[in-house]
Image (spheres, rainbow, N blue to C red):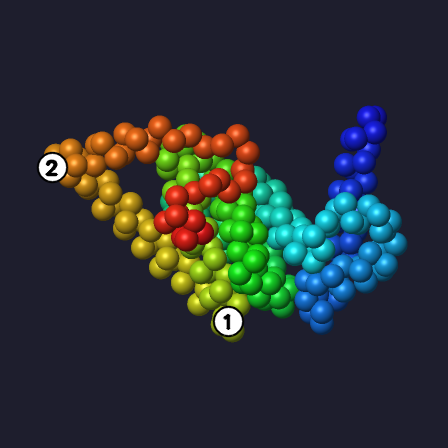
Amino acid sequence: MHARASEDIEVTATRQAVLAAALPHVVFDGWSDATLAQAVEDSGSNPAVARVAFPRGGIDLALAFHHARDAELAAELAEAELAGMRFRDKVAYAIMRRLELVAREREEVRRAAALFALPHHAPDAARALWHTADTIWNALGDSSQDFNWYTKRATLSAVYSASVLYWLGDETSDFSATREFVGRRIDNVMQFEEVKARLRKNPLASALMRGPMRILDRVKPPADTAPPDLPGSLRREC
C-alpha cells in the first residue's frame, strides 16, 4: 500500500473515531475546539493526525458530522424501494429520511445550525446544504447536464434548509408537522416548474425565453460536487 493511501486511511479512521467521541460533548460545549480536544483525548487518537483531519477545529468537526449523515442517507437511498413512487414523493421521502437519521441528535443539529449561521461560516453552510442536495439528487438518479443541474440543487438546498429549521421546532408526534411542511414546499416548487413548462409551450413566451435559455443550457455541471461559484441569486437561495 502506498504511503499516501495509508495516511488517508488513518486520517479517515481518526475522523470517524473523534466524531463518535465528540457527540456526547456537543450538547454541552457545541461544535467547538474544546469539544474537539476532549474528543481526541477520549478516543485515544493521535493529536497530530487529528489536526490533519480537522484543520480548522470545531467547524470541521461539525462538517464531518453533516457529511457522515449524508453518507448514511446515500447508502439508505441506494437500497430503498422507490420505483413506484411519484418523483415529488421520492424527494420528500429523502428529505424526511435525512431528518430521521438525526432524530436523536436534534441538539447536535441545533448547535451546528447556530454555528453555520455565523456570517464567517456562511460559505461552509452553503457547501453543507449543497452537499445534501447533491446527495439526494444523485441517489434519485438525476442525469441533468445543463443549467438544470445547478437549479435543482440550489432549489433543493433552499427546501432542505427551511425544512431543518422547521423540524428543529417541531414537537408533533413522528414529526408529522414537518412532513406536511416538506410536502407543501415541494408542491410550491412543482407548481413553479409547471409554470415554466407552460411558458415553454406558449409560442410568444417561448420566443422570449429562447435566447436566455439557450445560453443557460450551455452551462455544464462541474466534475466534482463542491458548490460552484453560483450567480448571486442562486448563492442567496442556498
Residue 127 position in % (x across, y down): 54, 48
Residue 134 position in % (x across, y down): 50, 42
Q: Nearer the viewer, mark 1 or mark 2?
A: 2
- State whether residue 191 appears in this view: yes
Q: Say whether residue 94 is left or right of residue 32.
A: left
Q: Is residue 139 above or below residue 3?
A: below
Please rate how many residues cluster around mark 2, counting C-alpha atoms within 10 Å: few if below 14, some from 14 to 19, many from 20.
few
> Which residue is rendered at x = 43% and y = 49% of the image?
235
Q: Nearer the viewer, residue 44 or 125?
A: 125
> Which residue is rendered at x = 70% and y = 63% of the image?
32
Please rate how many residues cluster around mark 1, counting C-alpha atoms within 10 Å: few if below 14, some from 14 to 19, many from 20.
few
How many numbered dots are placed on residues in this image? 2
Kind of residue indicated by mark 1:
Gly
Q: Say whether residue 121 is left or right of residue 2.
A: left
SS at mark 1? loop
Q: Nearer the viewer, residue 87 or 116?
A: 116
Q: For the view shown, which residue lies furthest in the left direction?
A: 204
> Which residue is rendered at x = 50% and y = 71% of the image?
169
Residue 207 position in % (x across, y down): 15, 33
Q: Nearer the viewer, residue 72 or 124?
A: 124
Q: Which mark, by number, is residue 204?
A: 2
Residue contact at pointers 1 and 2, CB within 8 angstroms: no
According to the image, label 1 marks what residue? 169
